[in-house]
Amino acid sequence: MKQTVLLSFISLMSILSGCITVEETYTFMKNGSGTSTIKIDLSELKAIMNTMGGEIEEAEPSQLAAIDFIRIKDSLLLIKGISNVQTQLDNSNFSIELYYEFTDKTSLNAAMNTIFKSKNAPYFEYNTKIFKLKHRLPTPIIDEIKTTSKPTFSQNVDYKIKISFEQNIKKVSTSSPHSISENKKQIVLKSNIHELIINPELFNTTIKLK
C-alpha cells in the first residue's frame, strides 16, 4: 500500500528531533471557490542534518523526494473542480509545498481525501454565512506517529491552519488556540502533532461570517 506524503514524512523525521512546521493555508471567495496551500517546512532541521554530514548529507535529495507532493499531483488533477496544481521541492531550504485551486466544497473535500488518503471525510462544510472545519489527523497517521516516533517528535511538529475569507469573521467557536487578524478576515488555528493525537477533534471549528 502506498504511503501518504505525510506518512512518508513521519517515517523520515521520526529518527530526528527539531522544530518542524506543517502549515495549511486556505482562501475562500463568496462563491465557494478558493485556493489551498500545504507546506512542510523542515528548514530548522537543515543545520542539524548538515552537522551529521557523510551519508545523511548525500541522501538529502532522495529523502525529501520521498515526501514530495508531486506523487499525488496527477490524482488531484483528475478531480473535477481542481486546477492549477503546483508542487515545489526545495532541497536547499528543506521545504515541500503543494498548491491548488478549487471551485467548490465538493472539489476541495475530494482533494483533501486524496491528500490524506481518507474516504469521503467532510473536511469542509460551508455556505455564505456559516463555515465548518472538521479536520482531524487520519488514524493511520496517528498510529504511525505513536509506533515509530520518539516521544519528543510530535511535540516539535507545529501544525497551523490559516483560513482567509472575503467577508469579515463575526464569531468563532473552536477549542484550538487561535488568532484573528486585525481586519477580521483571517483566522489562524495553532497546535502541534502531540496535541492533535491527544485530541483529534482539536481543529474542529465553526465560523460565522458577516
Image (cartoon, grey):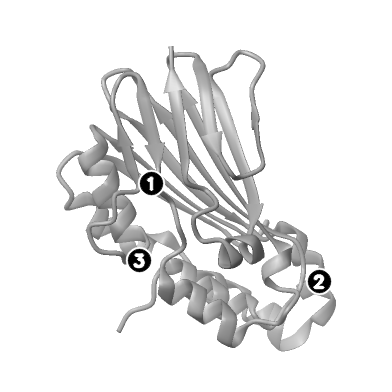
Residue type, numbered disc 3: Arg
Give the numbered dot on residue 48: 2
Q: Label 2 crowding class (10 Å Cα cut-off): few <14, some 14-19, many 20+? A: few
Question: Image quadrant for the C terminus?
Answer: top left
Place residue 61 in its image quadrant.
Answer: bottom right
Vertical placement of residue 152 versus 187, above or below? below
Q: Secondary structure at mark 1?
A: strand
Give the numbered dot on residue 106: none
Vertical placement of residue 201 versus 99, above or below? below
Of pointers 1 and 3, the one earlier in the residue sequence: 3
Q: Secondary structure at mark 2?
A: helix
Place residue 126 in its image quadrant.
Answer: top left
Give the numbered dot on residue 86: 1
Image-based side of 100 in relation to 68, left or right: left
Rounded to the nearest angstrom, the CA distance separating label 1 from label 2 is 29 Å
Rounded to the nearest angstrom, the CA distance separating label 2 from label 3 is 27 Å
Of pointers 1 and 2, the one earlier in the residue sequence: 2
Location of mark 3 (residue) = 71
Which residue is found at the position 29% from the left and 43% from the top? Answer: 108
Residue type, numbered disc 2: Ile
Which residue is found at the position 42% from the left and 60% from the top? Answer: 69
Query: At which x and y percent is residue 42?
Result: 67, 61
Image-based side of 199 in relation to 86, left or right: right
Query: At which x and y percent is residue 59?
Result: 62, 81
